[in-house]
Image (tube, grey):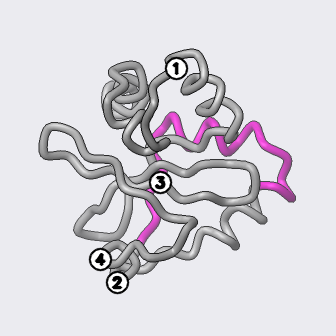
């Protein structure tokens, strides 16, 4: 059975959103194992660092960052697009969004917080 697993931080991020928005995000976040193999859709992105592969899914005005798991996917963060965009503008890196995020240590700290909470 394919599952979408929210870590404690991503679950908390979802819980503060209005219920209608939560439902909209969950309805649009349709991810299947074969989607992770071919990311041709502009809604998907992949971030690589130190042998780790994290996926980004654009959904409404939010970005859902998740990782493949044997039972499905683990959602690490659910962030408003302006949060990441503001971070990228502050860092002033001349790369694509996914490349900038992959090189940003602060972003990976956000992701790793879920494992330690």
Could you give the CA–CA distance between mark 2 and mark 1, rounded to whole angstroms?
A: 34 Å
Label 2 element class: helix
Point out the stretch of residues depicted in magenta.
Answer: 3-21
Q: Earlier in the sequence, mark 1 or mark 3?
A: 3
Give the Cα separation between the discs numbered 4 and 1.
Answer: 31 Å
Residue at 55%, 27% in the rendered image: 88
**Residue 34, numbered circle:** 2
Q: Pointer 4 and pointer 3: residues touching (CB < 8 Å)?
A: no
Q: Nearer the viewer, mark 4 or mark 1?
A: 1
* Residue situated furthest left in the rendering: 51
Q: Which residue is mark 4?
A: 37
- Asked if the residue under mark 2 is in contact with the one under mark 4, i.e. CB atoms within 8 Å, the reply is yes
The percent coordinates of residue 72 (x first, y second) are 35, 69
Q: Position of residue 67 (x, y in %)?
A: 34, 55
Nearer-N-terminus badge (3/2): 2
Q: Residues within 10 Å of mark 2 (few under 14, many from 20)?
A: few
Residue on which disc 3 sits: 56
Residue 117 in sight here: no
Q: Say whether residue 112 is magenta.
A: no
Q: Are marks 4 and 1 in contact (CB under 8 Å)?
A: no
- Which image quarter is the C terminus in? top left
Residue corresponding to mark 1:
92
Label 1: element kind:
loop
Horizontal and vertical percent for residue 82?
A: 71, 34
What is the crowding at mark 1: few (fewer than 14 residues within 10 Å), some, or many (at least 20)? few
């Amino acid at each position: 059975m394919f599952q979408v697993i929210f870590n404690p931080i991503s679950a908390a991020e979802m819980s503060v959103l209005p219920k209608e928005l939560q439902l909209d995000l969950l309805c649009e976040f349709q991810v299947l194992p074969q989607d992770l193999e071919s990311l041709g859709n502009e809604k998907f992105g992949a971030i690589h660092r130190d042998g780790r592969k994290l996926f980004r899914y654009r959904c409404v005005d939010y970005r859902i960052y998740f990782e493949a798991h044997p039972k499905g996917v683990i959602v690490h963060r659910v962030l408003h697009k302006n949060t990441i965009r503001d971070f990228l503008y502050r860092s002033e890196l001349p790369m694509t969004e996914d490349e900038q995020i992959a090189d940003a240590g602060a972003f990976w700290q956000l992701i790793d917080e879920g494992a330690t909470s």
